[in-house]
Image (cartoon, grey):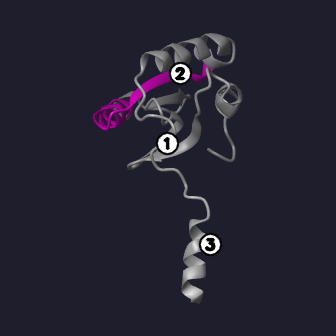
Amino acid sequence: MRCDPSEPEKRLWGKLSRSQLGGHKFRRQSVIGPFIVDFLCPQKALIVEMDGDTHVDSSDDRRDAALGEMGYRIIRVVNHEAIPNIDGVCETILSALEQAPDRWASPHPNPSPEGEGLINLQGQDS
């Protein structure tokens, strides 16, 4: 899916990428536990799922319940609604983002330590 997204996924990603939607950062095809979600805003624990012709409601319900127990909120967008109404879809997502509390204070609690690898390599040489 990541290498060959559907047209609705491409269009939605075009609106979500590069923090374009209200400054919120999204990731595509993120792994959460045993699941892969279409779009994730980690700061707000918001998942956006694109539902095409092949999705199954009963398995979606179990998956959504499991993700909900992990603290995530899920918004489902039907593919055929995304193309003609991408702005409306984005408004719905933005509204959910604005209502959701932050999961952590900025900056991210686990920043990548700059130069950590260099320090460890230098320590091995001595």
SS for callout 2: strand
Q: Is residue 60 above or below residue 96?
A: below
Of badges 1 and 2, nearer the viewer stands 1
Task: State the extent of the magenta-drawn residues as a range.
Answer: 60-80
Residue 69 is one of the magenta-drawn residues:
yes
Left or right: residue 48 versus residue 103 is right
Q: Position of residue 1 (x, y in %)?
A: 62, 44
Residue that appears at 67% across and 32% down:
17
Element type at marker 1?
Answer: loop
Q: Which residue is mark 1?
A: 108
Give neighbour class at mark 3: few <14, some 14-19, many 20+ (Cα, 10 Å). Answer: few
- Callout 2, which amino acid? Val
Residue 89 is situated, as x and y percent measured from the top left of the image, at 59, 15
Q: In the rendered structure, which disc, 1 or 2, sits on the residue that comes first in sequence?
A: 2
Residue 38 visible, this orientation: yes
Q: Relative to residue 85, is residue 123 depicted above or below?
A: below
| SS assignment at label 3 | helix
Question: Which residue matches tag 2?
Answer: 77
Q: Quadrant of residue 18?
A: top right
Q: Earlier in the sequence, mark 1 or mark 3?
A: 1
- 1 and 2 marks in contact (CB < 8 Å): no
Residue 72 magenta-highlighted: yes
Q: CA distance from mark 3 to mark 2?
A: 44 Å
Residue type marked 1: His
Residue under pointer 3: 118
Q: Are marks 1 and 3 in contact (CB under 8 Å)?
A: no
